[in-house]
Amino acid sequence: MTILPYEPRHAEAWRSLNEAWISTLFVLEPKDREVLNDPQGKVIDRGGEIFIAELDGEPVGCAALLPLEDGGYELAKMTVSEAARGTGLGRKLMDTCIARARALQAPRLYLETNSGLAPALGLYRAVGFVDLPARDTAYARADVFMELALSEPPPSR
């Protein structure tokens, strides 16, 4: 598996990978459609980054870093296709995002997720994310809020 920075050729994979998991478990919300339909304008042009994971040239996963006002980044739209689940790709995507945020000297990574996504929550906690109090969010499905302080060394595996 290879993890690549987003290129315009990845636009359809970015949209379809995310639509697949969101629409299976939840409802696609207006904020989802905005980001998924315009990755260049809503992520890249605003100082964010998107990573696409490929297996034999086929996109099988993705994740984004969205800039926050404090210099941190929000980890967003991270998913692995059903066919690639259980391969360690989620961890590889996570490690890529953490390494990139550290390289950008971000003080933290932040994320919003859902309490029903046990495998994702396990991954987040395994890399050192901690729970935050509830807050206002643009997503109806988000009921868990977490952050990872990047000034601290990564947890041992």
Image: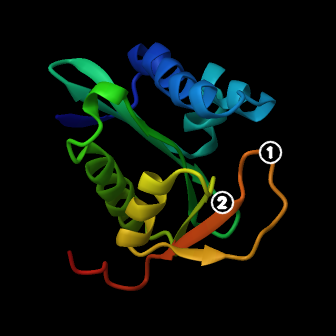
Establish if 87 lies above or below 96: above
Q: Quadrant of the C terminus?
A: bottom left
- Pointer 2: what residue? 68
Query: Between 148 and 102, which is closer to the camera in this rendering?
Result: 148
Secondary structure, mark 2, is loop
Tell me what residue is drawn at x 72 percent, y 27 percent.
Answer: 34
How many numbered discs?
2
Where residue 50 appears, as percent x and y from the top left, is 45, 38
Residue type indicated by callout 1:
Ala
Tell me what residue is drawn at x 31 percent, y 22 percent.
Answer: 59
Tell me what residue is drawn at x 35 percent, y 28 percent.
Answer: 82
Q: Residue furthest right?
A: 136
Q: Is any atom of residue 66 visible in this view? A: yes
Establish if 69 lies above or below 151: above
Query: Between 101 and 138, which is closer to the camera in this rendering?
Result: 138
Where residue 40 appears, as percent x and y from the top left, is 57, 27
Using the numbered discs, state the Cα–Cα distance from disc 1 to disc 2 in whole angstroms.
20 Å
Q: Residue furthest bottom?
A: 152
- Pointer 1: what residue? 140
Residue type indicated by callout 2:
Leu
Establish if 155 lies above or below 27: below
Query: Between 46 and 156, which is closer to the camera in this rendering?
Result: 156
